[in-house]
Amino acid sequence: MELSRRTVIAGAAAAGVAATAVGGTAHATGGRKPVKELFGKLADGTKVYRWSLENGGTRMKVLSYGGVVQSLELPDRRGRYANVSLGFDDLDDYVASSPYMGALIGRYGNRIDKGRFTLDGKAYQLSVNDGENTLHGGAQGFDKRVWDVEPFAGGSDVGLVLHYTSVDGEMGYPGTLKAKVTYTLTRDGDWRIDYEATTDKATVVNLTSHVYWNLAGEGSGTIEDHELSIAASRYTPTDAGLIPTGELAKTAGTPFDFRRAKPIGRDIRAAHPQLITAKGFDHNWVLDKGITDRPEHIATLRDPSSGRTLKIATDQPGLQFYSGNFLDGTLTGTGGRTYRQGDALCLETQHFPDSPNQPSFPSTVLRPGQTYRTTTVHSFGV
Ligand code: GLA
């Protein structure tokens, strides 16, 4: 976390805790083991746990259900904490009606046209759950699975290792996919996600995280004042079902140009056909850096009111920026307030949507013997 020493100590005083417990590089708590508690039970009796982690000034609560980030607390410029990630108090809300709040997404983040694809000459039909398409892995994706969770606290990092094995044919995907996701809170308060997967048959995979951010605090209102930059000169326009047409369109001269930071609300009501179709921003940006060996900085989100910032680095080629268009006031969050359209945004690092049907997009095929590996780092500051 990019905090001045003064901010850290002021923050500690405001929060009524010892300065050493808050963090910042000079005060890293490093090594405090995540704490586990029972969160709830699924209808079949399966227990769901909640883990609390803290490091470098960042506090986080994670569920074994869906690997959900239930809350993520950050200090503002005066050291006052707020939960900047939308979520629910009860497991029932996650099970009944969650639009992927805070969850891990798999096996395939984003949409696959009509839930169909062909691999090595064989046709597959996936679970269809978004009109005629497959979204975020199908009806029972990784966001609705209970993960095995192991805590760790070593050196200056704390974190959780989450495992889930998806059986051959689950939701229609070929191969037994063994997924391992590591959430790390670093001594600087960064949240790093390392994804890994292996398979025993050729398959497709595209894992991501679906946190809904509101840097002013969940339930505090619109994110249209947040300033966003995305290092992308192209994006993938879609058809009415939000499936990419295959074109890599230029962002220059369009509302999709976020190469220089601008408020999200500035162009969101422009009469651009792509904004009308998606009811706002809900597109994949083609990152200029392409696929990289290491995570590189690709986007910055800043809330002018609190001063909180989020920087995202990834090795992935794409970023889905979704401006919370389908939030409609029917869900009540952890703070007791309802979530309305534009009350949060998602920044999902990923391969492009529908890649299994788009030969010109970077491949999402994983074969036996290969290991899928990707990393995204969220760095917070004020
Ligand atoms: C993703 C999609 C959106 C929407 C949300 C969940 O971000 O791109 O279209 O489906 O998930 O509501």
Image (cartoon, rainbow, N blue to C red):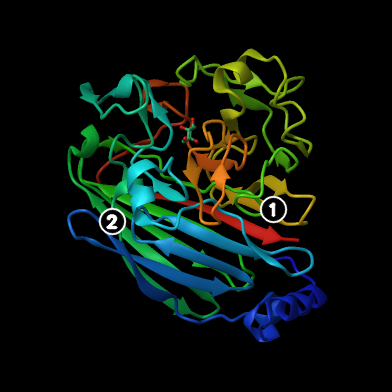
Q: Label 1, secondary structure: give it.
A: loop
Position of residue 268 relative to residue 24, above or below, is: above
- Residue in front for this viewpoint, 44 or 131: 44
Look at label 2 and name its amino acid: Val
- Give the residue type at disc 1: Ala
> Closer to the camera, 253 or 131?
131
373 and 260: which is toward the camera: 260
Tell me the CA gap for discs 2 and 1: 30 Å
Among numbered discs 2 and 1, the one appearing first in the sequence: 2
Task: Name, please, the residue furthest toward the right.
Answer: 6
Q: Is residue 121 visible?
A: yes
Helix, strand or loop at mark 2 = loop
Query: Who's the residue at 74% across and 81% down the image?
Result: 13
Look at the image and tell me in which quarter the N terminus lies. Answer: bottom right
The residue under label 1 is 216
Q: In the rendered structure, are the residues bearing label 2 and label 1 in contact, judged by CB atoms less than 8 Å apart?
A: no
Q: Is residue 64 above or below residue 264?
A: below
User: Is the distance from the Cβ of mark 1 to the nearest ligand 1 atom less than 8 Å?
Assistant: no
Q: Say left or right for 331 vs 337.
A: left
Q: Residue 329: where, in percent of width, then height?
A: 53, 37
345 in relation to 25, above or below: above
x%, y% of residue 222?
67, 41
Q: Which residue lies at the image location 21% right of the left edge and 36% below the top edge?
A: 174
Q: Which residue is mark 2?
A: 146
